[in-house]
Amino acid sequence: MCGIAGEINLQGSLDAERLPVWQAMQEKLRRRGPDDRDIYYDHQAALIHARLAVVDIAGGHQPMRLALPGRTLVLVYNGELYNTDELRQELLAAGHHFRGHSDTEVLLHGYAEWGEQVVDRLNGIFAFAVWEVERGRLFAARDRIGVKPFFYALRGDTLIFGSEIKSLLEHPMVRPQIDREGLAEIFFIGPGRTPGCGVFRGIAELPAGCCAVFDADGWQQRQYWQLQDEPHNDSFEQTVEKVRWLVEDAIQRQLVSDVPLGTFLSGGLDSSLISAVADKYYAERGERLQTFSVTYRNNEKYFVSSKFQPGSDEEFIRRMNDYLHAENHLIVLDSEDLVEALFAAVEARDLPGMADVDASLLLFCRKIKEYVTVALSGECADEIFGGYPWYRDPEVRSRYGFPWAQSTAWRMGFLRQDLAAEIDGAAYVDARYRQTVQQADVRPGLSDEERRLREMMALNLQWFMQTLLDRKDRMSMYSGLEVRVPFCDYRIAEYLYSVPWAYKDWQGREKGLLREAMRGWLPEDILWRKKSPYPKTHDPAYLAAVSARLRAILDEGTSPLLELVRRDALEALLVSDVRTPWYGQLMLTPQTIAYFLQVEYWLRHYRVEVVL
């Protein structure tokens, strides 16, 4: 895993005088790539790299060049390929030769052999750019699911790109401005983000499953992958067998590493399955897996059971620790540290995020990095296997709009009236919802329920899951920790998209198909444990702390937040007990207050200019 960035100027006006700018862009990626760094440049292109060394420590240096007769290719790449060995064998058979065993070298030779079609052959998480020197042409691509980021800005005949927005903002052509669309993203979509939108004015993101060319004809983007609804002809028994194979294969492929590797372990179904498969893999090699769990100081005192979070994780973590051969590390977080980390989380994401859900993950990953450089996590099983309440509750499922964001009217009440008069939040959100639903691939002849569930999966993969993947990438890479997500294997998503709901909802249980398919891997009480989301703190000290911070901002009275948000609405928030989540299931009063703290910090720290 790494950080990449670059500048392409088609007029050929780049030279060494620009080096301090490129070095500044590179420095902003230092946390993503603390192990090595380099810059390639010629008169048209600068490719910037900061490396986190995971595979082929000695041989994976970037930018990586490949000189062929009449053709020179230069690659910067952030990601991990899980079918490297198969691709290498194909390329060896085609006459290619390799100096090392990195997936970077395989990707570069793959591009030399197959050109743009190389993306169709890749199984992994990636964002990369290849500069073709003689042709004056850049090819860029992002993985199918969108695990790894690729932001860019077009300024005339110049392209500026990077793994993170902060890197682009170091370039003099890119300013930290937001317009009406940016305000709508922050206040009506956030912490989600419209696919392809970089929130800052003039910054975009290459969407998941897309690639692009930048040359004399400009920026030409195309979608090379999307979910297709195909007839599902497998019986339930065949489906169970196929799911078991896909999940096992995805996990095992992602255990390859030349540096220490561990797994997240919450005691829930998804992380426990990954840990169990990894534990067996390590035990067979006479090694011991490292697992990592998180909880909060005083959690046993203040935890409150709810519909969405019926029980705390500790007893299930203990159960899995007894079951596995692994060494577990329980990380205990304090409310005070959680509040401070809200602001580091903004710097990691470059945007306001999921409040303490982001902050806790950032602190958790910081501790994990003390032990390992790579970790596997259970994100995306809920989106793919139908684990969320909005999949399973017929009333919620049929409700119009994004099921995790039903609070647009309430959100609009925070915006100052002069701004609210210029930005129709309801229309903004509705247009994005309708576009996603209309573009979902649904074959004719399905029942209304099956059609709706295809739409729900498309909505979840393109929106809710992207928010979680943004969170996982930025919070982990902020500490130079690579986190892999086996349930994001595109083969699993492709297969599950068309599986009938009756199969997925086996025995009327969330992710019933996954549970049935993975029988034998876990103790029965873990296998059938009711879903519980990523834990949050219930300590009233946290609410008191974030409330005090917001109160101080209101009393001081000069914050840029107050130029956008109604003071009376924030005053009301401080004395309310919000039952409508700001986002998802768990962003209630403390998290909503924390979100506004993050917005305030973001406006100040990034010196955001509002341009209407």
Image (cartoon, rainbow, N blue to C red):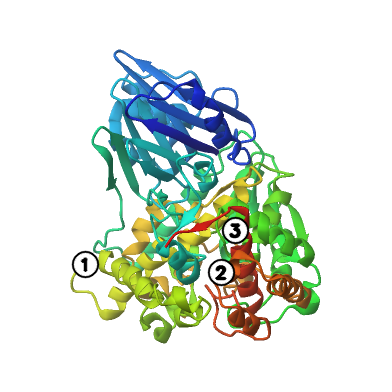
Q: CA distance from mark 1 to mark 2?
A: 48 Å
Residue 62 vs 529, above or below: the answer is: above
Quarter of the image with the C terminus is bottom left
Judged from the image, the secondary structure of the residue bearing numbered disc 3 is: helix
* Front position in the image: 474 or 501: 474
In which image quadrant can residue 184 be found?
bottom left
Whether pointer 3 and pointer 1 mark residues with C-beta atoms closer than 8 Å, the reply is no
Q: Position of residue 369 (x, y in %)?
A: 70, 45
Compare residues 496 and 606 and report the one nearer the observer. 606
Give the tally of numbered discs.
3
Q: Secondary structure at mark 1?
A: loop
Q: Is residue 263 above or below residue 186?
A: above
Q: Amino acid at mark 2?
A: Glu
Residue ID at (56%, 78%): 566
Residue underneath mark 3:
602
Judge the density around disc 2: few (<14), some (14-19), many (≥20) Cα neighbours within 10 Å. Answer: few
Is residue 500 visible in the rendered image? The answer is no
Amino acid at circle 3? Trp
Question: What separation in Å lies between label 2 and label 3 (alpha carbons)?
Answer: 14 Å
Q: Give whichever of discs 1 and 2 has the lower sequence position.
A: 1
Amino acid residing under circle 1:
Arg
Identify the secondary structure beneath mark 2.
helix
Q: Nearer the viewer, residue 299 or 198?
A: 198
Residue 362 higher or lower than 136, as above or below: below
Q: According to the image, label 2 marks what residue?
A: 563
Q: In the rendered image, which residue does mark 1 sit on? A: 443
